[in-house]
Amino acid sequence: MSAKKETVEIEVEATAEPVAETAGAEEPQVASSLTEQERADIAAMTYEQARDQLIQAVQALETGGLSLEQSMRQWEIGEALAERAQTLLGQVRAKLDAAQQRQAQTAQMAGTQSNLE
């Protein structure tokens, strides 16, 4: 017997877009409070900019005094900034790995006839 999953549309706020939620899913999908422009701004940030903004978001959360809505927004901003920083670090790691691989291949061929061809 196969279980059938149903997709249900829910509205989080009157101004929020409906979000699809799968019945029986472990984590429900929640509408983002970030605008497309905010997401684009974060996507254009350098690692250092994303890191600095992330520090500010964490400090705002640690300081306290925010409403639940403000705290959730800071959390979401922090998540987006952390993802951007992690993506950039991953790209740098891939470049370093590729450079190390090229260096290892060059070292293997050094002093051989094949590197003269």
Image (cartoon, rainbow, N blue to C red):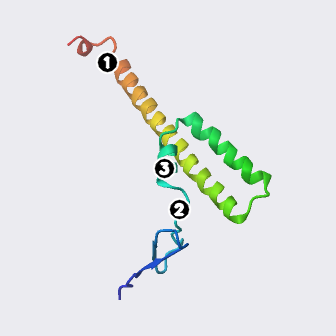
Mark with earlier residue (1, 2): 2
Q: Relative to 11, say whether 114 is above or below.
A: above
- Depth check: 69 or 23 in front? 69
Q: Position of residue 87 (x, y in %)?
A: 49, 43
Q: Nearer the viewer, mark 1 or mark 2?
A: 2
1 and 2 marks in contact (CB < 8 Å): no
Q: Amino acid at mark 2?
A: Ser
Residue 109: image tag: 1
Find the residue positioned furthest to the front: 15
Q: Secondary structure at mark 2?
A: loop
Gap between marks 1 and 2, in whole Å? 53 Å
Q: Nearer the viewer, mark 1 or mark 3?
A: 3
Q: Position of residue 110 (x, y in %)?
A: 34, 14
Q: Residues within 10 Å of mark 1 (few under 14, many from 20)?
A: few
Answer with the quarter of the image where residue 27 lies.
bottom right
Q: Amino acid at mark 3?
A: Gln
Mark with earlier residue (2, 3): 2
Q: Quadrant of the N terminus?
A: bottom left
Residue beneath disc 2: 32
Q: Position of residue 117 (x, y in %)?
A: 20, 13
> Image point 67% across, 48% down: which residue?
57
Q: Amino acid at mark 1?
A: Met
All told, the count of numbered labels is 3
Q: Secondary structure at mark 1?
A: helix
Q: Position of residue 19 (x, y in %)?
A: 46, 71
Q: Nearer the viewer, mark 2 or mark 3?
A: 3
- Depth check: 29 or 96 in front? 29
Gap between marks 2 and 3, in whole Å? 13 Å
Gap between marks 1 and 3, in whole Å? 50 Å
Find the residue positioned furthest to the left: 117
Residue 37: image tag: 3
Q: Residues within 10 Å of mark 2 (few under 14, many from 20)?
A: some
